[in-house]
Image (cartoon, grey):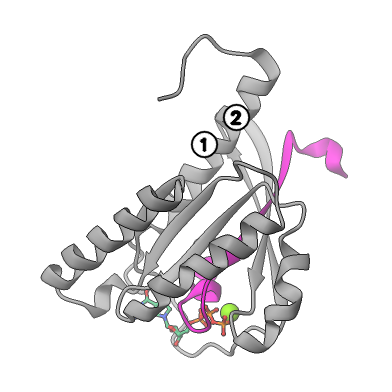
Amino acid sequence: MSGQYDYIWKLVVGGQGGVGKTTILHRYIHNEFIEDTKMTIGCQFHTEALERQGRKISLVMWDLGGQDRFRFIQGEYVKGASAAFVLFDMSRYMTLEASREWIAMIRENSTPNLPIVLVGTKLDLISQAEQDTINQSAQALVNELGLTAYSATSSKLGINVYETIHYMVDLLLWHSYQAEYGTSIQQA
Ligand SMILES: Nc1nc2c(ncn2[C@@H]2O[C@H](COP(=O)(O)OP(=O)(O)OP(=O)(O)O)[C@@H](O)[C@H]2O)c(=O)[nH]1
Ligand SMILES: [Mg+2]
């Protein structure tokens, strides 16, 4: 089975309950917005095959249940990940603060230097001025914790969803090429 893909990557999607993890994956895979979701119990898998830079890739996306009651098991789900997204709800500041715990948990259960992209969700719910403020706080957290990048999204409007996931895919491809062929280009 694995022979049909050049790469199979496990991507973990974490973040507080209700921030929009299941919804963003549904938007990515089915190009639809779901208004009424049920909380994810434990963990749900979504797989998506895609071709990028001429390579066949299988993404296995682990959509974690964000409710506190699932905290005891979350570390187990992170093991073996190639990369992670940590989502927060741009209309609920406390979910950005809570991202710190998610990032710590992911780092404890994965390899050093695992790419982690911080993703703001539901940008459609707040004004441009509020977006500017929260974007600054999110970027500050990225800098403080040495995360890979920050992206603001709306699954409702379909803004930056594909771009965010494909950014990660391209980064993982880049890392793979480096490991395969080496490179003379120095990363900043
Ligand atoms: N307005 C708006 N609502 C959104 C957006 N993304 C998600 N939602 C809503 O937020 C609610 C929660 O979304 P979920 O995807 O279930 O959240 P979750 O992070 O998977 O939650 P858990 O499974 O409990 O961890 C749903 O009612 C979604 O419709 C968005 O971009 N804009
Ligand atoms: Mg969910």
Residue type (three-letter) at the residue carrying disc 1: Asp
- Region rendered in magenta: 1-27
Indicate left or right for 133 with 181 as reference: left
User: Taking the image as drawn, is residue 30 in sight?
Assistant: no
Query: Which residue is found at the position 40% from the left and 70% from the top?
Result: 155
Q: Is mark 1 on a helix, strand or loop?
A: helix
Query: Which residue is found at the position 67% from the left and 37% from the top?
Result: 56
Query: Which residue is found at the position 32% from the left and 78% from the top?
Result: 93
Q: Does the magenta stretch include residue 139?
A: no
Q: Which of 100 and 149 is in front in this view?
A: 100
Indicate left or right for 110 with 91 as reference: right
Residue type (three-letter) at the residue carrying disc 2: His
Question: Splitting the image into 4 quarters, where does residue 41 fall?
Answer: bottom right
Classed neighbour count for the residue bearing mark 1: other residues with Cα under 10 Å, few (<14), some (14–19), many (≥20):
few
Q: Which of 26 and 20 is in front in this view?
A: 20
Give percent across and percent down for residue 77. 75, 66
Q: Is mark 2 on a helix, strand or loop?
A: helix
Task: Confirm if mark 1 falls within 8 A of ligand 1.
Answer: no
Indicate left or right for 35 with 108 as reference: left
Give percent across and percent down for residue 11. 64, 55
User: Which image quarter is the C terminus in?
Assistant: top left
Label 2 sits on residue:
175
Q: In this view, does 78 lie above or below 178?
A: below
Query: Which residue is found at the position 28% from the left and 71% from the top?
Result: 123
Q: In this view, does 131 lie above or below 5?
A: below
Splitting the image into four quadrants, where does ligand 2 fall? bottom right
Tag 1 and tag 2, C-beta contact below 8 Å? no
Specify the label residue 170 is tagged with.
1
Q: How far apart are marks 1 and 2 (CA)?
A: 9 Å
Q: Does the magenta stretch include residue 24?
A: yes
